[in-house]
Every structure is written in structure tokens, then in C-alpha cells.
Image (tube, grey):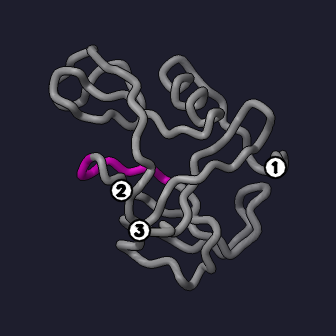
């Protein structure tokens, strides 16, 4: 069921493939065909070698909590405190981090290094947002 109380992200030219994949409950990022670097946030050139040969590639969705904070104030519509905002480092590349909420986990149980996996939060018929939950295995 879609959650229309939360912010709905808007795609732009560089992020449209990201949001299209998320709508299908897939996590995809551009990957440089020259040196294999994943590029996030999406942009038209590789930050490492400056190649414009990027290909949208599906990731495993597995990673670990790199750092996090617990939000205690109601600053964002649709989010009832306390909730966790985390940076998740993905397994595919050291330093490849996505900011996300940690779902399906009591706030006090979140820890740095916690293994997580992607899940998708449907916010409308058109938009699903990648989030993370504790990894089941």
C-alpha cells in the first residue's frame, strides 16, 4: 500500500533511470564501463576517470550501516520520531553509500556495521523509494 504522507522524490534527467528501477523494486546505479566505478549520486561522467561511458547496472542491495543518527524531532512530514537515518555502504564498492532509513528494526537495535538489505517503500503508484532493513541471512 502506498504511503502518500511521506515526501515524494522527483526525478530529473540524471536520476530518472534510478527511480524507474526503484518502481520495479530494483536498485540500479550507473557504472563506468571504463574503470568499473559505480557513480552515486547519478551524474553524466565517472568521477574517477571522467569517462561518459556509463551503464545502469543492478546491484545486490546488500550492504552495512556505515553511520547513522536517530531523529527525535518531527522535521519531515510522514516520519514519526524516533526514526533512523543511516548511510549504508553497499557491498559492490568501498565508499559507495546511500542515505536511507532503516526499516523493520527497533531504533535501539541499529548499529554501525549492521548487515542490511534493500527493501522498497511504495510512496505512490509511480514512486518507490529504496530503504534498508536488517539482512535476514
Expressed as whole percent of the image width and height from the top left, the position of residue 115 reads 41, 68
| Span highlighted in magenta in the image | 93-99
Residue 63 — which label? none
Badge 3 or badge 1: first in the primary sequence: 1
Point 48% across, 58% down: residue? 117
Where residue 107 appears, x then y in whole percent?
Answer: 60, 79
Name the residue beneath numbered marker 3. 115
Q: Residue 89: which disc?
A: 2
Q: CA distance from mark 2 to mark 1?
A: 26 Å
Tag count: 3
Is residue 111 shown above or below 127?
below
Q: Position of residue 82 (x, y in %)?
A: 68, 75
Q: Nearer the viewer, mark 3 or mark 1?
A: 3
According to the image, label 1 marks what residue?
Answer: 3
Residue 97 part of the magenta-drawn span: yes
Q: Are marks 2 and 1 in contact (CB under 8 Å)?
A: no
Considering depth in this image, is 44 or 61 the residue closer to the camera? 61
Q: Which residue lies at the image location 59% right of the left edge and 36% below the top edge?
A: 22
The answer to whether 129 is drawn above or below residue 100 in the figure is above
The residue at the point 27 percent across, 14 percent down is: 52
Q: Position of residue 113 (x, y in %)?
A: 35, 72
| Badge 3 element | strand
Q: Quadrant of the C terminus?
A: bottom left
Crowding at dot 1, Cα within 10 Å, few <14 / some 14-19 / many 20+, comes out as some
When the figure is inspected, residue 95 is found, relative to residue 128, above or below; the finding is below
Mark 2 vs 1, N-terminal side: 1
Amino acid at each position: 500500500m502506498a504511503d502518500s504522507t511521506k515526501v515524494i522524490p522527483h526525478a530529473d534527467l540524471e536520476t530518472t533511470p534510478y527511480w524507474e528501477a526503484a518502481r520495479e523494486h530494483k536498485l540500479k546505479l550507473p557504472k563506468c564501463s571504463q574503470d568499473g566505478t559505480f557513480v552515486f549520486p547519478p551524474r553524466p561522467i565517472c568521477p574517477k576517470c571522467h569517462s561518459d561511458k556509463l551503464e545502469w547496472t543492478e546491484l545486490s542491495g546488500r550492504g552495512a550501516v556505515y553511520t547513522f543518527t536517530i531523529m527525535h524531532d518531527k522535521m519531515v512530514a510522514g516520519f514519526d520520531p524516533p526514526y533512523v537515518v543511516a548511510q549504508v555502504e553497499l557491498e559492490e564498492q568501498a565508499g559507495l553509500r546511500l542515505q536511507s532509513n532503516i526499516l523493520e528494526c527497533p531504533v535501539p537495535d541499529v548499529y554501525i556495521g549492521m548487515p542490511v538489505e534493500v527493501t522498497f517503500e511504495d510512496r505512490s503508484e509511480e514512486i518507490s523509494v529504496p530503504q534498508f532493513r536488517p539482512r535476514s541471512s
